Image (cartoon, rainbow, N blue to C red):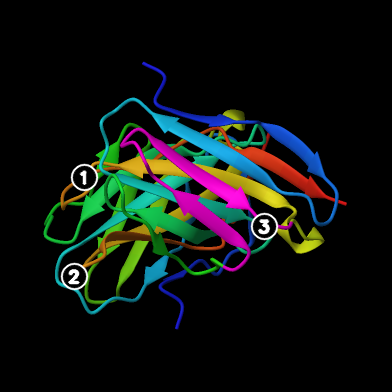
């Protein structure tokens, strides 16, 4: 059982380039999230989805777009990369609802923008 | 206002001793969940323990326990009998069930724990 898989794991971009991070989960989770992690700032929510075909903005959405065309996939796009987007990106998923529905994380994607 | 506050950027503990990592939260919801995650130097996020807002007993998972004080809005993580492998970053998180937008998870800034041999 793979859980949450992120690709790529590492990427170096030049300022202005675009790229897409792919997140795939095989747990039939309704909710999917993209976070970025920066030193001293914890995890900040970029965008999230409450189900197939839905997306919503989180705390730091500027410069990113997302799509969830299939329930198992959640794509994060950088339209025109900036050095401020250098970060570690985590995808996570959960069942939704109340109770002990845990956030399950991918291994992270380290992005460097030069 | 911060939803999750972790006031200890770094902590040291002697091997085999117990350590408490502090976490306070801010919510007006009655139903919410509290979580702790561990992030070792390898970078993955590992779920440790969960406490529901209606749970009357403190959650325990092996050497981990969550000291839940609802009136104080605190959810401290207690690690007993520390091991060298416990050296990692620890994040406290809260889940709120927000109308129309569903589950929202908020994270603190983390506490870096170093276990000293």
Mark in front: 1 vs 3? 3
Chain identity of mark 3: A
Which residue corresponds to mark 1? A100
Which residue corresponds to mark 2? B99
Horizontal placement of B50 versus B42: left or right? Answer: left
Of all residues, the one furthest to the top in this rendering is A1
Q: Earlier in the sequence, mark 1 or mark 3?
A: 3
> What is the distance, in whole Å, between disc 1 and disc 3 at their CAs?
27 Å
B63 versus B53 height, above or below = above
Mark 2 lies on a secondary structure that is: loop
Chain identity of mark 2: B
Q: Residue at left 79%, top 47%?
A: A112
> What is the distance, in whole Å, between disc 2 and disc 1 at their CAs?
18 Å
Report whether mark 2 lies on the same chain as mark 1: no
| Residue B110 horizontal/vertical position (percent) | 56, 57
> What is the distance, in whole Å, between disc 3 and disc 2 at their CAs?
29 Å
Mark in front: 2 vs 1? 2
Residues packed near mark 2 inside 10 Å, few (<14), some (14 to 19) or many (20 plus): few
Q: What is the tally of numbered marks visible in this picture?
A: 3
The numbered dot on residue A38 is 3
| Residue B94 horizontal/vertical position (percent) | 34, 60
Q: Residue at left 59%, top 40%?
A: A21
Chain identity of mark 1: A
Whether the magenta-drawn stretch holds residue A70 is answered as: yes
Horizontal placement of B16 versus B54: left or right? Answer: right
Residues shaded magenta: A62-80
Q: Residue at left 21%, top 45%?
A: A100
Residues packed near mark 1 inside 10 Å, few (<14), some (14 to 19) or many (20 plus): some
| Residue B95 horizontal/vertical position (percent) | 30, 59
Q: Is residue A105 visible to the viewer in this orientation of the structure?
A: yes
| Residue B45 horizontal/vertical position (percent) | 50, 39
């Amino acid at each position: 059982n793979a859980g949450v898989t992120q690709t790529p794991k590492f990427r170096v971009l030049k300022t202005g380039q675009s790229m897409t991070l792919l997140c795939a989960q095989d747990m039939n989770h309704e909710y999917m999230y993209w976070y970025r992690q920066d030193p001293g700032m914890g995890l900040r929510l970029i965008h999230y989805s409450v189900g197939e075909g839905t997306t919503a903005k989180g705390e730091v959405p500027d410069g990113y777009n997302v799509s969830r065309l299939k329930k198992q996939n959640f794509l994060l796009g950088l339209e025109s990369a900036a050095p401020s987007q250098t970060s570690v990106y985590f995808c996570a998923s959960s069942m939704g609802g109340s109770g002990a529905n845990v956030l399950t994380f991918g291994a992270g994607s380290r992005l460097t923008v030069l | 206002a911060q939803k999750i506050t972790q006031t200890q950027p770094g902590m040291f503990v002697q091997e085999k001793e117990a350590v408490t990592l502090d976490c306070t939260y801010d919510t007006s919801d009655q139903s919410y969940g509290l979580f702790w995650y561990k992030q070792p130097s390898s970078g993955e996020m590992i779920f440790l323990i969960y406490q529901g807002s209606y749970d009357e007993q403190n959650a325990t998972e092996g050497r981990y326990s969550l000291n839940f004080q609802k009136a104080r809005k605190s959810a401290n993580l207690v690690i007993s009998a520390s091991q060298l492998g416990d050296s990692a970053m620890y994040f406290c998180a809260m889940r709120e069930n927000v109308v129309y937008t569903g589950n929202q998870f908020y994270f603190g800034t983390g506490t870096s724990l170093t276990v000293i041999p």
